[in-house]
Amino acid sequence: MNALDVDYMLGLMPILLGYLPLTLQMAAAGMVLALILACLMAVVRVLAIPGLNAFTLLFISFFRGTPLLVQLFLFYYGLPQLLSVLTQINGITATIMGLTLHFSAYMAESIRAAIVGVDRSQTDAALSIGMTRGQTMRRIVLPQATRVAVPTLMNYFIDMIKATSLAFTLGVTELMGATQKEAAGSFLYFEAFISVALIYWGVVELLAWLQRRLETRLNRAYQR
């Protein structure tokens, strides 16, 4: 049994870290776009807007019911066959599209549940003193719903960072793609994949720490 090549791992780490910004950029772009789309769908679901509500339910059902990898292949390989304008789409754009649509379906339901979870009596009280529904949503409902939804949304962001590892299947040389190439060149697969696992782990632990700090700050107003 061969010994673990620690020197190779130490030399590989800086190389792999050079690809971390691309991984984080794809995840951040996907998160921002998914959050916007999820908020819109959550409002549609809460208000039960005719027509749009049915379409939103179908959207959520499809993107929650099919694997992310299938969706990435659909955007990168499938849609360009139907729409010629998409033939110039690159792997990074396809990955961001996939992350956005896939995770927005999950986030929409989390945000909807957070909004619905706010006590209805508070909404009624706000309306009774002359607030509009828009003001009630902005000043009463959303601040409380945000506090409830933040932990779940942060978990989705963490999942999104890990999901960017599928981008290498579209030819994107991000963190996982770079690891695959380095491992294939050195044949030290165990060392290479342990190295990338440690990098993902470190990023996730940092985000988990930030999440705990944010939760503490949001809960401060509710502590006695």
Image (tube, rainbow, N blue to C red):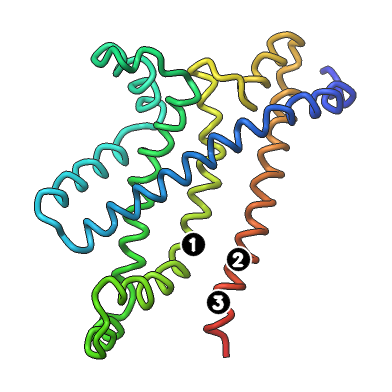
Residue drawn where x is 73% and y is 26% of the image: 16
Residue drawn where x is 74% and y is 11% of the image: 187
Q: Calculate the distance from the C-alpha at mark 2 to the C-alpha at mark 1.
A: 8 Å
Amino acid type indicated by mark 2? Leu
Q: Say whether disc 3 or disc 1 marks the residue closer to the N-terminus.
A: 1
Residue placed furthest toward the right? 7
User: Residue 20, position in %: x, y?
Assistant: 67, 33
User: Residue 88, position in %: x, y?
Assistant: 40, 14
Residue at label 2?
A: 214
Q: Which mark is on residue 15?
A: none
Q: Which mark is on residue 150?
A: 1
Q: Calculate the distance from the C-alpha at mark 3 to the C-alpha at mark 2.
A: 9 Å
Q: Quadrant of the N terminus?
A: top right
Residue placed furthest toward the left? 50
Residue at label 3?
A: 219
Q: Say whether disc 3 or disc 2 marks the residue closer to the N-terminus.
A: 2
Q: Say whether disc 2 or disc 1 marks the residue closer to the N-terminus.
A: 1
Q: Counting other residues with Cα less than 10 Å from the Cα at mark 3, is it few (<14), some (14-19), or many (20 or more)?
A: few
Position of residue 73 in the picture relative to residue 28 (left or right): left
130 vs 139: above or below: below
Mark 2 vs 1: CB contact within 8 A: yes
Position of residue 141 in the picture relative to residue 32 (left or right): left
210 vs 86: above or below: below
Residue 15 falls in image quadrant: top right
Residue 190 falls in image quadrant: top right
Residue placed furthest toward the top? 185
Q: Counting other residues with Cα less than 10 Å from the Cα at mark 1, is it few (<14), some (14-19), or many (20 or more)?
A: some
Amino acid type indicated by mark 3? Asn
Helix, strand or loop at label 2? It is helix
Q: Calculate the distance from the C-alpha at mark 3 to the C-alpha at mark 1.
A: 11 Å
Amino acid type indicated by mark 1? Val
